[in-house]
Image (cartoon, rainbow, N blue to C red):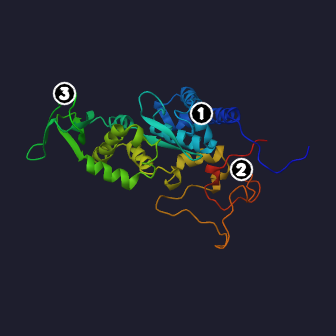
Amino acid sequence: MKTTGKPEVTTLQDSSQRLANALKKAQPAFQALGRQYIDPERFARIIMAAARRPPKREGQKTILDCTTASVILACMEAASLGLEPETPQSHCYLIPYGNVCTLQMGYPGLEALALRDKTIKRIETRLRYAKDVFEPQYAPVVSLKHIPCLDDAPGDVVGVYAISHFADGDIDFEYMTIAQVNAIRDRRSKGANYDSSPWKTDEDEMRRKTVLKRACKRWGKSKELKKALEIDNHEDPKERTLDPEISDFMAELSPPARTMTLPPASSPAPQSEAPKSAPAESHREAKCDGVHSNPPCSDPHCWLTCDPEPR
């Protein structure tokens, strides 16, 4: 049979089966990373159910449009936090960016991680509307009085706050105006203006998460919470520092990851050595076969963005 050299078309069924196989192979890693919080078989079932979910709108990317390596990496990050993605609890989500799947936190997930610190009894995040009675006090005693307006028209959302109730009876809170929230959104979220962005579809939830993230810088003592903030502050997984334990597991599952680890967030990604007069070759044009038995392409993230061609 004569071959044309063109890659075969991968169907959704192919992608689904490949992901199912990878999740099964990764279950020992999920168990080791998740410790007492994760049941690896249940975890894998949740991921597959989310992957098979149809897109909410035409043209929207799904988990199955992403490379298997990037999905497994996002799942390992979730497992390392002891959180299940894509559940009604809204702890965290698997979000496609092009063909790369990335983990994003929900504010309930940040709350759950903060509450693992036994000095914190309860955390609440609430919106402040224009007609609400709102009286914050920072000194000499920290206190907060919020009486919501129960009318059908309470006015616009003008602020948002997170409040923590500690086991010793003290409280602490963080308040932000909507202008402050929007300034952080515009500075930190590259995809905020896309129709599929949670800033478009779930704006109030994103406002809650923004103020909670700021508060957790003071409240967050657990390693998992600090890791969650690091993950959520870098939408693109290529900009994150890869956890050494996750890196070892990924190297076992995806051999190219052993020599092509993600650079630290402070280090710029290496650039192609192609002459400036000519466009840099893509991994396909450079004849990268996805398993790197040939000399790999110049993209240091090829293992994350390139699936092996169907055999």
Indicate which label's residue lies in the foreground, 2 or 3. 3
Q: Nearer the viewer, mark 2 or mark 1?
A: 2
The residue type indicated by label 3 comes to: Asp
- What residue is shown with label 3? 151
- The mark that comes first in sequence, 2 or 3, is 3
Q: How many marks?
A: 3
Q: Nearer the viewer, residue 118 or 191?
A: 191
What residue is pinned by disc 1?
Answer: 27
Identify the mark at residue 290; answer none if there is no mark: 2
User: What residue is shown at x 59% (from left), y 55% (from top)?
Assistant: 261
SS class of the residue under badge 1? Answer: helix
Q: CA distance from mark 2 to mark 1?
A: 23 Å
Provide residue 128's location: percent of width, then percent of height.
22, 38
The quadrant holding residue 167 is: top left
State which quadrant residue 206 falls in. top left
The vertical placement of 199 against 184, above or below, is above
Q: Position of residue 47 (x, y in %)?
A: 56, 31
Alpha-carbon distance for marks 2 and 3? 59 Å
The Cα atoms of the two marked residues, 3 and 1, are separated by: 50 Å
Q: Categorize mark 3 by other alpha carbons within 10 Å: few (<14), some (14-19), many (20+).
A: few
Mark 3, secondary structure of its residue: loop
Question: Callout 2, which amino acid?
Answer: Gly
